[in-house]
Image: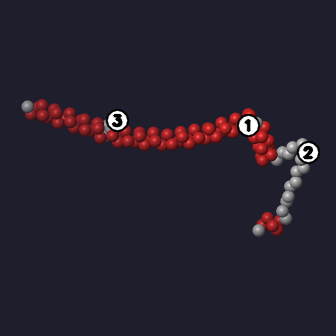
Amino acid sequence: MQKIIGVLIVLLLLLQYRLWVGEGSLAEVNNLKREIAIQQQELAQLRQRNRALMAEVQGLKQGLAAVEERARSELGMIRKGETFYQIIEPEEQREH
């Protein structure tokens, strides 16, 4: 009878060890859940960024207004027949 109790105690200790410390332990499961939550946040941010980029691509494909806006703001282009005026402030006013 004592041998059976001894074997049961050893088995209980082994199972407890695996539960708290070994592979698949509660601590490891909690760490994995935390990592999953972080990855899900990053994925949500990347999906939002992708949606914004896709909307921009669709705007560029579908309409000339977006292309024109980009050409004006980034390249300084103007339409035919328009006159471009550039106002340069004197040095004294720029410093203040």
Where residue 5 sits, quadrant-wise, is: top left
Disc 1 marks a residue whose amino acid type is: Leu
- Report, in whole angstroms, how far the alpha carbon at label 3 lies from the one at label 2: 73 Å
The answer to which image quadrant residue 30 occupies is top left
Please tell me whether mark 3 sits on a helix, a strand or a loop.
Answer: loop
Q: Is residue 47 left or right of residue 2?
A: right
Q: Nearer the viewer, mark 1 or mark 3?
A: 1
Asked whether the beta carbons under mark 1 and mark 3 sit within 8 Å of each other, the answer is no
Image height of 5 relative to 83, above or below: above
Marking on residue 24? 3
**In the image, 14: left or right of 81?**
left
SS at mark 1 in the image = helix
From the top left corner, tell me how far across and down residue 42 is, in percent. Answer: 53, 42
The numbered mark, 2 or 1, whose residue comes first in the sequence reads: 1
Residue of label 2:
81
Q: Residue furthest left?
A: 1
Going 8% across and 31% down the picture, which residue do you hit?
A: 1
Residue at image location 70% in from the left, 35% down from the top: 58
**10 Å neighbourhood of mark 2: few (<14), some, or many (≥20)?**
few
| Real-space Cα separation, disc 1 to disc 3, in angstroms | 50 Å
Residue 8's label in the rendered image is none
Looking at the picture, tell me which residue is in the foreground, 41 or 79.
79
Amino acid of disc 2: Gly
Identify residue type, mark 3.
Gly
Q: State which quarter of the image contains the C terminus.
A: bottom right
Return the residue at label 1. 60
Within 10 Å of the Cα at label 3, are there few (<14), some (14-19), or many (20+) other Cα atoms?
Answer: few
Q: Residue furthest right?
A: 81
Counting residues from the N terminus, which is met first, the one under dot 3 or under dot 2?
Answer: 3
